[in-house]
Image (cartoon, coloured by chain):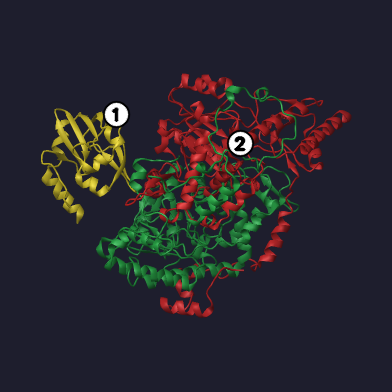
Chain colours: A red, B yellow, C green
Amino acid sequence: MDFILHDKETIAEMLTSIGVNSLEELFQDIPADLLLKKLNLPHGLSEPDLLRRLEELSHKNKIYSSSFLGAGCYYHYIPSLVDFVISLSGFYTAYTPYQAEASQGYLQAIYEYQTAITRLTQMDVTNASMYDGSTALAEAAIMATVATQKKKLILLEGIHPEYVEVVKTYCWGQDIHFEIVMEDTLISKLDESVAAVLFQSPNFFGDIENVTELVQIIRDKAPKCLVVQVMTDPTCLGVLKPPGKFDIDIFVAEGQSFGISPSFGGPGLGIFASKQKYLRKMPGRLIGKTNEIDGEREGFILTLQTREQHIRREKATSNICTNQALCALASLIYLVSLGKTGLQEIALQNFQKSHYVKQKLATIPGYQILNKKPTYNEFLVKCPNVNELIEQCKQENLLPPLIISKYFPDMKDIVLVCVTESNSREDIEKFIHAAQKASNKNIGGN
Amino acid sequence: MDLKFPADLKYAPTHEWVRMDGDIATVGISDYAQHKLGDIVYVELPEIGAVLEKGNTACEIESVKAVSELFMPLTGEIVETNGNIADNPAFVNSSPYGEGWIMKIKVSNPDEIKNLLSVEKYQELIEKEED
Amino acid sequence: MTSNLTLIFNKGTKRSQHNFIPEMDIDKVDLLKIIPSSFQREDLPLPDIPEVKIVRHYTELSRKNYGIDSGIYPLGSCTMKYNPKINEVITRLPAFFQIHPLQEENQGALELIHQLSELLIEITGMDGFTFQPAAGAHGELTGILIMKKYFENKNLKKNKILIPDSAHGTNPSSAKMAGFSIIEVRSNDAGEIPLDHIEFAMQQGDVAGIMLTNPNTLGIFDRQIKDITNIIHKYGGLCYYDGANLNPMLGICRPGDMGFDIIHLNFHKTFSTPHGGGGPGSGPVGVIKELVPYLPGPHIIATEQEFVCREKTNNSIGRIKCFWGNFGVIVRAYAYILALGAEGLKRVGQMAVLNANYLRVLLKEKYHLPYDRICQHEFVLSDRGIPNEVTTEDIAKRILDYGLYAPTIYFPLIVKGALMIEPTETESKASLDNFVNVMNKIYNEAKTAPELLKNAPHNTPVKRLDAVLAARNPILHD
């Protein structure tokens, strides 16, 4: 299979126009000993053969009837129109909108995305997207050190462990120091040398922090220190008070929950928003509204580009170029499809259904809910027999919850359960049943 | 090009102008510099109280597609900046020697002043650059 | 004056929308029992919009946007080639699209990543790959961090890096993010790297190596590439290959054979995955054997029974992104390579270069071609000699009037008023001839009716927009 249009005669004709005798002559600058004799790869495949081959491969992955796994990647219902709209070729097959006048459709859509996120988060400004939640958090960390001219960060315990690793990698690159601290020792660690405190809420273990209190503690002890919040499932903003109302300086989130399929964890969407005063330090693209030079119509354009690598090169706020535009578009379509009513209702269902499961589990012998704070759609459960629970879930064709010792080896016999609106009553009963059976087995076995 | 270069000012080879008043130097960018930069969209004003040496970067001036640095023409402390150009960076284009001034420096080494260029020398320098 | 624009937010109705909310099938409790009221938001300023209105709104917007499905997209260094539709079907296969990154039963996904790695090793001549980086610049950062770690482990203080003046802007920016300072190498009159400059720089002892793209942004293959990499290696340095321009090298010449130690690829360029208006991309990084342990984990290893992953090795730079990278994009690239096979990939390299040279010889009749020699995937024209002070931007805007997209403009920086043109292999001769005709017409218009260009575009949804106003008074949301 290929996507070439020239026949032999056309190639010959074009070679003549160029003034060479063969295709090989076009590569005359390449030293002969570097020219490849042959790629040792299989022959190409036709479309039906390719499809069959990859279908077979895909079947080596399992899909479940329902999921109780979250931990940074979530199953929410995706309206059909999301994939339809992003697949329109004016969006799908476009490049970054460098020529604004021929890219008004996409520019307007991303301006609408910036508007939707700004309204949802109540932050002042939102960029056109970052790669994902983890890299958005790392970029926020760096931005805070640039804005404050300080090189020390505090990460509050409870940030997604893979996000912490990404922040660590980025910080090592720029010689930025950070420390992970428990909430009760935060005050003692705060001083004027800290560029920012980074925290996740709802956090990796499911806890919703008392953000008002947290921000107050930081402002009191270190007034110039920035407060950075990260979120892995922002559907909770349908009900929860948004970061802009808590005086958060930089807000980042993984936007996968907004209309993007899990797809083995990528692509997702890095949501990035900040206060107006840090606008010039923000990484990534920004779309602005403007007017025609010689006319009355309004239009959209890439703006404040002097922050970016193609102009400022090594002095740029970040090296990001390609972002996740199509995922930003998907999240916009998701948000406007659900609308105010839908977003509120989805968040409510996540609260209610996970609460329901929590209550039910707590009544089964051997299970204990570990969260002391309010939770959204995830919570920690101590189990009588983790492996048996996982096994029972699989037997019910349920994607089992996360065994938390994968990331925290000291936390034994604990799972992180995720319940969303996508879990029906029937799924939930199956899960409870699986937990019950695991409990019975354990008691029987002992 | 019809560019103006007031004779009562001193100039730095990096295209800043300086107007002395006692030990206070008012600084901006020359008509030539603003013309080269094109429409200025943003000036990140230097921090008041900063003490910087001659040749250090004092602040950045941005047009739509370029960023250029404003260098300290003299060593000293930044005592005042022109807040008006934060909201109206176009002043730097329309009135580089007047409303578009950028900062005032309390000069700490007056000997440096005589190393600045006279208007004649500065115009010679520009002609060379244009070649 | 009423605005010409209607944003989606103005299309709301008072009727609330419930289309996408499953029925609540459990008994609710009072929400205040779950979450205190002080944690709850008071207002959610988003409208309720009927589905029909949403689909019409975005269908209309998509029509106001050029894509590779509209026609030639000659952006230099962007490799805007046709995106095969089968790849969209494959990436949406439920057992790829719906799987969770942390689920255990993932052998198909691991096998795919492992197989793709093997294919890329053959295509590029490297020894190992990571797929975590989400885009080209992200791959650059990963690669440069590997360099940093490598010298740290050797206890060598090498904090500078050589980057030619023709490099993509991401190169210096990525190097800076890894803590390197940049030594810019000036290209010579032939657009190539002067050997004595890099030799001198390497002699200083604090230079880690070089970041290069070859063919470079002028579309020129550096004939002394082997000498360049030899010099860097002679002084213990490492050579980084920016894979943005790999397309013309497919099946022709491999970065590994040129002497590169670390490379990144852009799946959304060379391997046909859709650019999506600016992502998602995928920027895998390949390295030589010695550097494989430095790659971000998890590493996928094939045992006799199954594919397993090792979280990370001692020398690994650590994670650069959550989970496995942009898997949905990785699947498309894998499908593309399997579809084309050895012969198909070589055909890509050949036809990309044929198309670029064909445009080059036809366009240089009227336009100034500063580096006049055989090119690879792209070439660069300048604005020299364009009549009546017509600028590169004016030409670009006028191209839009003819229903085509403009080349990359004002880049590379080493050519004044640059027009950087890369047609890719998926354009027909008729399409290329049409582009030449349009460019020639525009040249004639510059002579006879320059105002037509200076006020261009005229036929687009809006006329030329005021970038100065946008930057002076940023309006970033409604």
In the rendered view, tell whether residue C216 sits above or below residue A440.
below
* Residue A174 % position (x, y): 46, 38
The quarter of the displayed image where residue A53 is located: bottom right
For numbered disc 2, what is the local secondary structure? helix
In the rendered view, tell whether residue C358 sits above or below residue A368.
below
* Res A336 visible: yes
Tell which of A18 and C67 is nearer to you.
C67
In the rendered view, tell whether residue A432 sits above or below residue C464.
above
For numbered disc 1, what is the local secondary structure? loop
Nearer mark to the viewer, of 2 and 1: 2
> Could you tell me the amino acid type at mark 1?
Ala
Q: Are marks 2 and 1 on the same chain?
A: no
Instruction: Please give the count of numbered marks on the rendered protein.
Output: 2
Residues at discs 2 and 1 in contact (Cβ within 8 Å): no
Q: Chain of mark 2?
A: A
The quarter of the displayed image where residue C389 is located: bottom left
* Residue C289 % position (x, y): 58, 53
* Residue A309 % position (x, y): 41, 47
- Please state if C195 lies on the left or on the right of A111 as rendered: left
Tell which of C183 and B75 is nearer to you.
B75
Tell which of C245 and C1 is nearer to you.
C1
User: What residue does disc 1 label?
Assistant: B50
Q: Chain of mark 1?
A: B
The quarter of the displayed image where residue B110 is located: top left
Tell which of C332 and C37 is nearer to you.
C37
* Residue C3 % position (x, y): 41, 46
**Residue furthest out toward the right:** A444
User: What residue does disc 2 label?
Assistant: A341
> Could you tell me the amino acid type at mark 2?
Thr
- Please state if C38 lies on the left or on the right of A302 as rendered: right
Crowding at dot 1, Cα within 10 Å, few <14 / some 14-19 / many 20+, comes out as: few
